Structure formats: structure tokens, C-alpha cells
Image (tube, rainbow, N blue to C red):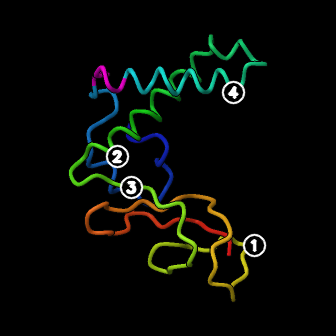
């Protein structure tokens, strides 16, 4: 399975050149991140203690942490852009309910994925203007 979170996105061709998730061993650093993310989710959703026993949720969290780890350790690392206030057609697409005349980004629906060194946009972010 390749990059579960982006499988149906146009960017999937870029990501499939990377190795499958199953080949990445959980290093101590990844395990630490995984434990921290799980702990935060379980403490936020404390009203649902049964989530700790949910294998599918655990698997989803593992895959999310693995994707985030791969994006940060590849060379050059990728970065998620989620805080730009100005609409940039080379980095953003407007959500269907956006004001087409406005250039001010009010909210991100989906972050843009950029090369952290060159700024090349691999996947445009979806924004509301």
C-alpha cells in the first residue's frame, strides 16, 4: 500500500516512487512520535475509552505518522503550507464556495505540499477565499 492518505489525490504519481509503507521499520524516533500522537488522540477523546482497543484506528494512526515521517526525512524534505494569507494560483485552488473576486485566504481545507528548499509545489492546497 502506498501513501494511504494521498492515494486518491492527483499527487499520487509523485508519491508512488517512494517505498511502500510496510518496508519502513519503526525506528525509536517514529515509535516515540506514534506513542505521542496516540496519547494525544486518546486524551482528547477520553469519553471513548474503547478507541484504545480499536485496531483500525491504531493502524490509521501508524500510517499517518509514517507518512508524516517520510515527508520530513526525505531529501529535500517536504513541508505543508497552511498559513499563507494571500491566494497564489500556483499553490492554491479555490473551494467551490469561495469568493472568486477575493485574494485573501480565509481558511484552508487542505494544505499545499511544497519542496522545502525550492518551494516547488507538488500538490496545491484547497482554500476558501
Neighbour tally class for label 1: few under 14, some 14-19, many 20 plus, Cα within 10 Å? few
Q: Residue at x 62, y 84 (%)?
A: 103
Asked if the residue at tag 3 contacts the one at tag 1, i.e. Cβ–Cβ closer than 8 Å, the answer is: no
First in sequence: mark 1 or mark 3?
Answer: 3
Q: Quadrant of the C terminus?
A: bottom right
**What residue is shown with label 4?**
44
In the rendered view, does 33 fall on the left or right side of 27?
right
Q: Distance from label 1 to label 3 (Cα)? A: 26 Å
First in sequence: mark 4 or mark 2?
Answer: 4
Q: Distance from label 1 to label 4 (Cα)? A: 31 Å
SS for dot 1: loop
Q: Position of residue 127 (x, y in %)?
A: 62, 68
Q: Position of residue 113 (x, y in %)?
A: 42, 59
**What residue is shown with label 1?**
97
Residue 28 colored in magenta in the image: yes
Res. 79 mark: 3
Q: Distance from label 4 to label 2 (Cα)? A: 25 Å
Q: Distance from label 1 to label 2 (Cα)? A: 30 Å
The segment highlighted magenta reads 25-30
As drawn, 32 above or below 86: above
Neighbour tally class for label 4: few under 14, some 14-19, many 20 plus, Cα within 10 Å? few
First in sequence: mark 1 or mark 4?
Answer: 4
- Please state which of the two labelled residues, at mark 1 or mark 2, is closer to the viewer: 2
Asked if the residue at tag 3 contacts the one at tag 2, i.e. Cβ–Cβ closer than 8 Å, the answer is: no
First in sequence: mark 2 or mark 3?
Answer: 2
Q: Residue at x 69, y 89 (%)?
A: 101
As drawn, 3 above or below 108: above
- Please state which of the two labelled residues, at mark 1 or mark 3, is closer to the viewer: 3
As drawn, 66 above or below 94: above
**What residue is shown with label 2?**
71
SS for dot 4: helix
Amino acid at each position: 500500500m502506498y501513501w494511504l492518505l494521498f492515494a486518491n489525490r492527483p499527487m499520487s504519481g509523485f508519491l508512488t516512487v517512494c517505498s511502500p509503507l510496510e518496508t519502513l521499520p519503526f525506528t525509536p524516533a517514529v515509535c516515540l512520535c506514534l506513542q505521542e500522537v496516540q496519547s494525544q488522540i486518546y486524551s482528547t477523546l477520553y469519553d471513548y475509552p474503547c478507541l484504545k482497543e480499536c485496531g483500525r484506528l491504531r493502524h490509521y494512526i501508524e500510517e499517518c505518522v509514517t507518512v508524516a515521517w517520510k515527508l520530513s526525512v526525505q531529501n529535500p524534505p517536504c513541508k505543508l503550507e497552511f498559513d499563507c494569507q494571500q491566494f497564489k494560483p500556483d499553490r492554491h485552488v479555490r473551494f467551490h464556495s469561495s469568493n472568486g473576486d477575493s485574494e485573501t485566504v480565509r481558511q484552508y481545507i487542505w494544505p499545499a505540499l511544497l519542496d522545502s528548499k525550492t518551494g516547488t509545489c507538488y500538490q496545491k492546497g484547497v482554500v476558501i477565499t
